[in-house]
Image (cartoon, rainbow, N blue to C red):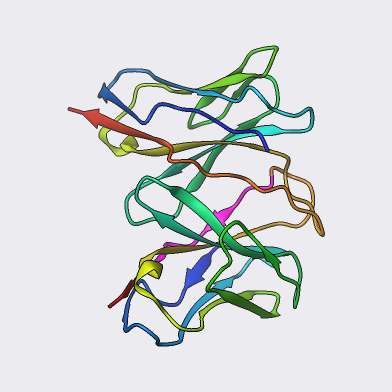
Amino acid sequence: DVKVTQSSRYLVKRTGEKVFLECVQDMDHENMFWYRQDPGLGLRLIYFSYDVKMKEKGDIPEGYSVSREKKERFSLILESASTNQTSMYLCASSPGTGGTGELFFGEGSRLTVL
Amino acid sequence: LAKTTQPISMDSYEGQEVNITCSHNNIATNDYITWYQQFPSQGPRFIIQGYKTKVTNEVASLFIPADRKSSTLSLPRVSLSDTAVYYCLVGAPMFSGGYNKLIFGAGTRLAVHP
């Protein structure tokens, strides 16, 4: 089974802190994604990557950056956390070619910024 | 990008068949219709995908009329464990180096009662 592991289920940070959210997948998938989920808004795409060292902005990239130094690892970085970044963050991966394009999600990281 | 519209919430009882309809009037020729299921505190999980007519797997059926402007996810004989949020997405599967943004809306919150 595909496993997408997010490093922390729950985090509490203070405004202005730098926050790292780590995601690792074990199925050699080319594509990796970071979403945030807020009540009533569904999932919104922050960044995605279709190859090592490649990244593309999603719908809401402001205030975030990402890093993909290895194929299996995709990190989301909040350079200076703000209270409006309190949210559930979901990492996903998918194979690169063909198939259904199925997204495999991690269990999420719930971030609270005080 | 094809926008989808689905009911915000639905209620059902154990043992009943549940049909969730999604409208997608602007679906493109190369778009597929994909449904995901999300339980509380978990990431979404792929349920089923189709292009036209009917698709069935061990979990659900997906009915797509000839004009493809809508689709219906059918869950046979639901149980309490089917209580979840169901998302309808329209887009082309992502291939290496390319990307088709899949938009997760607010989904349909299904509550199954005893």
Residue found at x 51% / y 83%: A79
Q: Quarter holding the C terminus of chain B?
A: top left
Residue B66 makes an appearance in the image: yes
Q: Quarter holding the N terminus of chain B?
A: top right
- Give coordinates of residue A101: x percent, y percent: 69, 47
Residue A2 makes an appearance in the image: no
- Give coordinates of residue B113: x percent, y percent: 20, 28
Residue found at x 37% / y 18%: B17
In the image, A39: left or right of B27? Answer: left
- The stretch drawn in magenta includes residue A56: no
**A21, A28: nearer the viewer:** A21
Residue B22 position (above or below residue A8): above
Residue B88 position (above or below residue A67): above
Q: Residue furthest bottom?
A: A17
Q: Residue furthest left?
A: B114
The residues colored magenta run: A101-111
- Tell me which corner region of the image, top left, top right, bottom left or bottom right, holds residue B92: top right
Q: Residue furthest right?
A: B97
In the image, B75: left or right of B66? Answer: left
- Give coordinates of residue B53: x percent, y percent: 67, 16
- The stretch drawn in magenta includes residue A105: yes
- Give coordinates of residue B18: x percent, y percent: 38, 21
Residue found at x 70% / y 21%: B52
